[in-house]
Amino acid sequence: MTALLEVSGLEVEFRTAEGIVKAVKGVDFTVERGKTLGIVGESGSGKSVTSLAVMGLHRAASSTVTGSVKFEGTELIGAVPETVRKLRGRRMAMIFQDALTSLHPYFTIGDQIAEAYREHHGGSRKAALERAVEVLGDVGIPEPRRRVHEHPHQFSGGMRQRAMIALALSCEPDLIIADEPTTALDVTVQAQVLELLKKLQQERGLGVIMITHDLGVIARVADEVLVMYGGSAAEQAPVDTLFASPRHPYTRGLLDSLPRLDAAEGEALSSIPGSPPSLLNPPPGCAFHPRCPVYAAEKNPLCTGERPQLRLVAEGHRNACQLDGVTA
Ligand code: SF4
């Protein structure tokens, strides 16, 4: 059966005054209907650029996207803009991090949902506003018939994010890409929004890509996890496997950085030393080697030779560490 979304060999480069920035280097993944792929990594890891490239939202004048992005078997890379435009919003929708800047301050919530709906389905403004009332109700906005006429500033942060989800759902998409959808919310509202997304996904069989730097969010919603570092995939596995048996030193570092309830009093939080790599002049070999505790201890030349690629290391589990399976 054809996957909902199949991405292979995706590369994104930006032309800058300083040179070519290789933001995404050969990323592969698939998203199935009813499943959530979590993409996790620090700022600059390439996770958001990957999602924008999938949606065809990169600036063609300053960037180059190569590889393959197939939506239900239809190739989007190199397709005529009309093909991508028809899919975007209608079949593939995106939820952004900051609802306040994503929603237009001058238009009512209802007008913004109605406009998106009419763009893809046509029909009267009245019918589209009815649809807006319906989806606002679906995402738990109280009194949707009254609130559909309110502006974004009249909604709380959590309600605005719900409105963004309603906007994404209004055209009944098959795939939703949620880019840090709960980062700006407090933990209680964050939990509510994640529960809502999960519920809607299960009810409608949506494929979801959840992009986040927060492993807590990944643990809550993802089926499969892709860990990105320096524009490349570092590790990929089912969520339970990744949390129980992380194999890449970067993934282990991320997990060790999580606060633990059983930590001894006064125990310092662990952190990954150093900073993410420059995408303009990345380190040779494994981009993680300047920060990697295994490399620091072993100075294995494999780490600074070829750039590591994801390879299968156990059933359903792929790792891009050169030393995985290599005995000293
Ligand atoms: Fe660390 Fe070497 Fe593995 Fe990279 S390839 S993660 S530097 S051990």
Image: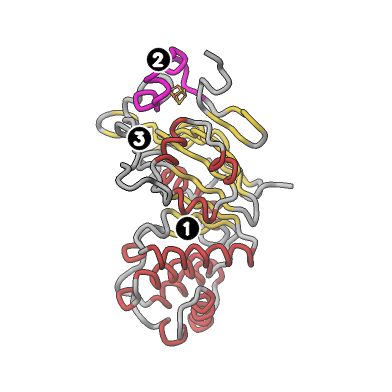
The residue at the point 56 percent across, 42 percent down is 69
Q: Residues within 10 Å of mark 2 (few under 14, many from 20)?
A: few
Query: What's the image's color scheme?
Result: secondary structure
Estimate the x, y position of residue 186 in percent, counting from the top left.
Answer: 36, 64
Estimate the x, y position of residue 39 in percent, counting from the top left.
Answer: 49, 45
Check residue 297 for magenta coloring: yes
Would you say the beta carbon of the disc 2 residue lies within 8 angstroms of ligand 1? no
Q: Tag 3: residue type?
A: Ile
The residue at the point 47 percent across, 34 percent down is 11
Query: Relative to 313, is 152 on the left or the right?
Result: left
Residue marked by disc 2: 299
Residue lying farthest front?
265
The residue at the point 53 percent across, 47 percent down is 80
Residue marked by disc 3: 272
Which is nearer the eye, 25 or 239?
239
**Residue 268 quadrant:** top left
Classify the position of ligand 1 by quadrant: top left, top right, bottom left or bottom right: top left
Estimate the x, y position of residue 123 in percent, counting from the top left.
Answer: 55, 77
Magenta span of residues? 287-308
In the rendering, which numbered label is found on residue 94?
A: 1
Q: Tag 2: residue type?
A: Lys
Residue lying farthest right?
1
56 in relation to 86, above or below: above
Circles 3 and 2 in contact, beta carbons < 8 Å: no
Q: Earlier in the sequence, mark 3 or mark 1?
A: 1
